Structures are given as structure tokens and as C-alpha cells.
Image (spheres, grey):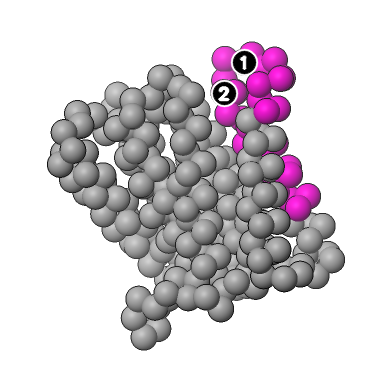
Amino acid sequence: MKKSTNLIVGIFLTLIFYGMGIFVSKIISFKSDFFPKSFITHSTMLLFSIIGIVYFSKNSYFSFQFKKLRFKYYFIGVLIAIAGFIIAQILATLFLTIFGFEIDPSGRGHTGIEEMSSLQFFVFIFIYASICEEFLFRGFTQNFLMPLNTIRFNISKNVYLSLPVILSGVLFGLAHLILLNTETSGPMIFRIVIMTWIGGTIAGYFQEKHQNILPAIIVHMTLNLPGLLMSFIL
């Protein structure tokens, strides 16, 4: 498969898998006091991601690996994720302030999440959403785009960001524009998009560097940690 074709197909399938999660959640009538509607969205997304990973890895389009990794690298991932979260918040706040937007109190995020209890947030956002979204954007998308990893942007002598890492981060951030369909304020959506873009790039870097999706999931969970802590306060 040509690199240009690989790029188009990879992004197209990502949009399809993500869109199917949203579509299925809208057509399935699901009422529960404990399971949020996002459970259907993320479950569908995870199902399509796993099917895609199994099919394309079986047919040698890409490899999905779980290489052994020492604990210290998970710890490093957590520290960098925290730094990335702080940087994202600073950048978003500076931008919003400069352009005169009202700064929202940084709570749990958007309206759907604010309706959850702390237990629901822990189960369905901190754990489940982190796993499902990483299987799509890093496990499937980034691995599918790996033939493009020769296109790199050097940060230092030993650190670089490949095009697949950058694209998976951008797609992950843009995916959160779906919040425009909710009552979430514009400034909060902007803040979330910036945070998920930077956080997704960090997750992608660790996925590519260690050929293991687990560090990416840990990075994702770390980004959701402030929201989890806030859920016990608000």
C-alpha cells in the first residue's frame, strides 16, 4: 500500500470507527442508573478497533505488539503526562485570556461527565474510556499509519515525533469537537481539545517508543486523573 493511500485509508477508517460509536449510541435506547450513554459509544468504538487491529495485523498491514516494559517507563510516562496537562492548561488559559474569553472553572470537563458520580467517573472515564480511546487512536490509527514514521520532527538528539504520532494526537484532539453538540461552553471545549491533543501526542510517543499500548493507556488515565479528583470535590 502506498504511503498516501495508507494515510487516507487510516484516517478514513478512524473516522468510521469513531462515527460508528456515536451512531450506535444514538440508535440504541439505553437507560440505566449506573451505565452512562458513553458506555455504548466507547464499547462500539472498542469493538471496531479490535476487529480492525486483528484483521489488519493478521494480513500483515501492521503489527500490534506488547513488548515487555520496565516499571520506570510507566512512571516517566505519568510524569510527562502531568507536565503535558499543565502545559496544555497554561496554553489554553493564555489563549482564552488574550482573546477575551471567559475562563471557566476547571471542573470535570463537559456536561455529560459532570452528571456522573465519582464511581461512574472512575469506572467509565478514568478506566474504560482511556482503554477504548487508546485502542482506537493509538492501537489502530497510529499503528496503521506506521509506514509514515520515517517522516519525523526532531526535538532533541534522541527524541523525535513521527508523523503517525502527531496525526494520532491531532485526530484525538479534534475528536473532542463532538462536544459542540452538548451544552459544554466553547472555552471549555477549546481547553479539552488542547489538552487531548497534547496528551494524545504524549501517549502516541510512548506507544511508538516502547511498542506497547499499555504506557499510552497509563498516560491517558493520568490526563483523566484531575477530573477524577475533582469528582470527589464537586
Dot 1 amino acid type: Ser
| Residue at left offset 50%, top offset 71% | 162
Give residue 95's quadrant in the image: top left
Q: For marks 2 and 1, give the CA distance.
A: 7 Å
Q: Which mark is residue 36?
A: 2
Task: Report the magenta residues as a range.
Answer: 23-52
Provide the major secondary structure of the magenta segment: helix
Dot 2 amino acid type: Pro
> Where is 134 relative to 209, above or below?
above
| Residue at left offset 63%, top offset 40% | 18
Q: Is residue 4 visible?
A: yes
| Residue at left offset 70%, top offset 49% | 13
- In the image, taking residue 175 as reference, residue 225 lies left or right, namely left
Give residue 41's quadrant in the image: top right
> Where is 165 relative to 128, above or below?
below
Which residue is labeled 1 in the image?
A: 32
> Where is 7 relative to 189, above or below?
below
Q: Residues within 10 Å of mark 2 (few under 14, many from 20)?
A: some
- Give the camera-side residue of 159 and 177: 177
| Residue at left offset 50%, top offset 28% | 120
Asked if residue 37 is among those painted magenta in the image, a careful observer would answer yes
Tell me the SS state at disc 1.
loop
- In the image, taking residue 123 as reference, residue 226 lies left or right, namely left
Instruction: Verify CB contact (< 8 Å) between mark 2 and mark 1.
Output: yes
Indicate the position of residue 183 as horizontal and vertical percent values: 40, 19
Tell me the SS state at disc 2.
loop
Check the image and name the residue furthest to the bottom: 157
